Amino acid sequence: MFKGLIISFSLMFLITYGSYSQEKKQVEIKVKTSAICIQCKERIEQGMAYEKGVRDIVLDVDSKIATITYNPAKTTPVEIRNAISKLGYDADTIAADKDAYAKLPSCCKKNGKTTN
C-alpha cells in the first residue's frame, strides 16, 4: 500500500510538472518589419499584445526589428508574421496586407506611397 501511495504521488508530480513547464516555455524570434516611425512602433506593439501566445514584443524603429517572445504551444512564427502583416506592415518575407496598409497614416507608408 505504501508503495502504491508513493507511485501515485510521483505520477501526480510528473504530470503537474510536465504541464507547468510546457506553459512556461517561451521562445524569442526577431522579425524584420517595414516600420518607419514611433506611430508604427506603437501600432505594432499594441496590436501584437492581443495575439494569442505572444508574451512580449519590442520594436526597434531604427533597425525595424521586432523582438517577439511567445509561447510555441499557442502560436507559431508564421502566425506571428501574418499578424504583423494584417496590421499593415511587412514581416520578413510576408508582405503587408494591402487593405491594412492602405489604412495606415501617410507617415507610416514606405516613401509616403500606397502599395498596388
Image (cartoon, helix red, strand yellow):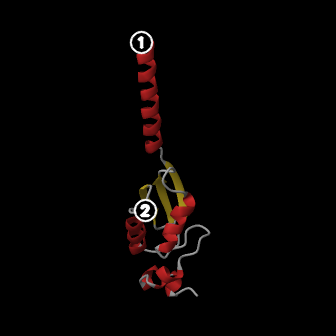
Which quadrant holds residue 53?
Answer: bottom left
| Residue that appears at 49% across and 69% down | 84
Residue 83, percent from left and from top: 49, 67
Between tags 1 and 2, which lies in front? 1
| Residue that appears at 44% across and 85% down | 106
Mark 1–mark 2 CB contact (< 8 Å): no
Q: Is residue 97 visible?
A: yes
- Is residue 25 positioned above or below 60 on the image? above
Residue 1: assigned label: 1
Measure the alpha-carbon separation of dots 1 and 2.
49 Å
**Circle 1 — which element?**
loop
Q: Nearer the viewer, residue 90 or 18?
A: 18
Residue 9, percent from left and from top: 41, 22
Q: Amino acid at mark 2?
A: Glu
Q: Is residue 35 visible?
A: no
Q: Nearer the viewer, residue 108 or 78?
A: 78
Which quadrant holds residue 45?
Answer: bottom left
Q: Residues within 10 Å of mark 1 (few under 14, many from 20)?
A: few
Q: Amino acid at mark 1?
A: Met
The N terminus appears in which quarter of the rendering? top left
Residue 46: assigned label: none
- Is residue 33 positioned above or below 107 on the image? above
| Residue that appears at 43% across and 62% down | 51
Which residue, as the protein is rendered here, is positioned at the far top?
A: 2
Residue 51: assigned label: 2
- Is residue 19 positioned above or below 92 on the image? above
- Is residue 51 positioned above or below 16 on the image? below
Q: Is residue 38 left or right of residue 111?
A: left
Name which of mark 1 and mark 2 comes first in the sequence. Answer: 1
Which residue, as the protein is rendered here, is positioned at the far right?
A: 93
